[in-house]
Image (spheres, grey):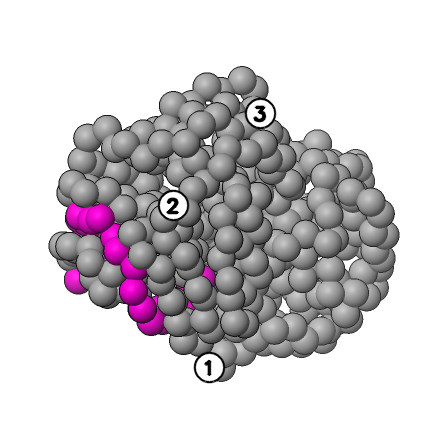
Amino acid sequence: MDTTVPPGSLRGALTPPCSKSYAQRALAAALLAEGGSELHGIDFCDDTLSALRCIETLGARVVRSGPTLRIEGGLRPRGGRLFTGESGLATRLFTPIASLWHEPVRIEGEGTLLARPMGALLEPLRTLGVAVCDRGGRLPLEVCGPMRGGAVTVDGSLSSQFVTGLLLALPLAAGETTVRVTDPVSTPYIDMTLDTAARFGVEICRNGYEEFFVEGMQRYAPATMEIEGDWSAAAMLLVAGATAGEVCVRNIRTLSKQADTAVIRALERAGAGLVCEAGSVTAARRPLRAFEFDATHCPDLFPALAALAAAADGTSLLRGVRRLRHKESDRAEAIRSEYGRLGVEVVIDDDTMAVRGGAVRGGRVSAHGDHRIAMSLAVAALRAGGEVVIEGAECVSKSYPSFFEDLQRLRV
């Protein structure tokens, strides 16, 4: 689907979807808790729906009432096929959980997920006693447990999701486990994992982000959890406000454990007008200056930061490019090529992206099947010299289905 975004100004307030990262972790914990849990404030983007299907396949009984889910947990897989859609987190989360079961479970996905690497998860599972059949470290794959305890080393340089899946599953393993992580990245996401486990009564001890100690034979306790607003979505809206008007984003907390709260630092460095209050943040347009920012631990911010840098005076330097190669697209190349079509020079040198700010021209661009690229290009289009047509814009449904409608609601 092509979506045309004309230039224009924004003013108003919005509530973004809930954090899909927290939502998926909470769904996994509710599955593992024997008894009834409630999750409030849920929004149903594609990735969250994929996680919901996974917990139902793995044995949970779910009653949906608006933004509330009532979940009767218990790991008792119904059938031997687990379909994770196009969600990398759901795949890396529920593969270890399925590995707790004593019968084979086949994990399948679709779209860009089929090209994303899963190998960093498979060797640790084998070390923990799981039989794994895979296709060169990619989907589809099959696991058969039960997973036992022990000592494993996980390569954390590609994604923290591999660590997250293991940490949420291992409390139910037969023995205690020591998980050593080499080159950990996206460490705030690990904080979210430990926070979710603790809310459901499970204890995981850590030594920094390089070593974790997980006692086996623990029990997840049913819990009630309110899912907070998504800072990844909020970042796009705040950048839109900082570059094209004034936007207040509600239902977000600056003290959240979410990695993308870091967008506040980037906006401050760029000189945006910012007002942070209890439960909301407002970003307003001011003359923007070039800035430097290391997004190694918050790579999902890159597309929003590219839109911010394109509006700043001078050349901004964004670090952490290596984290972008294995997302829904090669995000570094997608940003370089598509912003280039809009007249914005983007140069990539090893782990650094240089974005030369200035005028943005209208044109036709591609979302590359990537929800965050589509949103980034839409934000950049607000200050373009003409209309920007985004090919494949429907991919925003992966995380923020109403994004374009919300953007339209803010126009003045």
Whether residue 216 sits left or right of residue 10 in the image: it is: left
Would residue 158 be counted in the magenta stretch? yes
Quarter of the figure that contains the C terminus: top right
Residue 282 higher or lower than 299, as above or below = above
Foreground pick, 274 / 166: 166
Q: Residue at x 26, y 38 (%)?
A: 82
In the rendered view, tell whether residue 181 sits above or below residue 394. Answer: below
Mark 2 Cα-neighbour bin, 10 Å: few <14, some 14–19, many ≥20:
many
On the image, the x and y values in percent for residue 343 come to 58, 64
Q: Give the camera-side residue of 82 and 151.
A: 151
Where disc 3 sits, the SS reads: loop
| Viewport quadrant of the N terminus | top left
Magenta highlight range: 136-160
- What is the C-alpha distance between the residues marked 2 and 1? 30 Å
Mark seen at residue 67: 3
Give the CA separation, mark 2 to mark 3: 20 Å
Q: Of the residues tagged 2 and 1, which is closer to the observer?
A: 2
- Amino acid of disc 1: Asp
Which label sits on residue 33? none
Residue at point 84%, 47% (across, down): 277
The residue where tag 1 is placed is 350
Residue 43 seen from this side: no
Location of residue 331 (image quadrant): bottom left
Please indicate whether residue 62 sits to the left or right of residue 43 in the image: left
Taking the image as shown, residue 271 lies to the left or right of residue 51, namely right
- Tell me what residue is drawn at x 27 percent, y 32 percent: 76
Give the mark, 3 or 1, whose residue is nearer the N terminus.
3
Q: What residue sits right under mark 2 in the picture?
A: 90
* Tag 3: amino acid: Pro
Q: Is residue 203 magenta?
A: no
Kind of residue indicated by mark 2: Ala
Residue 31, image x and y in percent?
40, 35
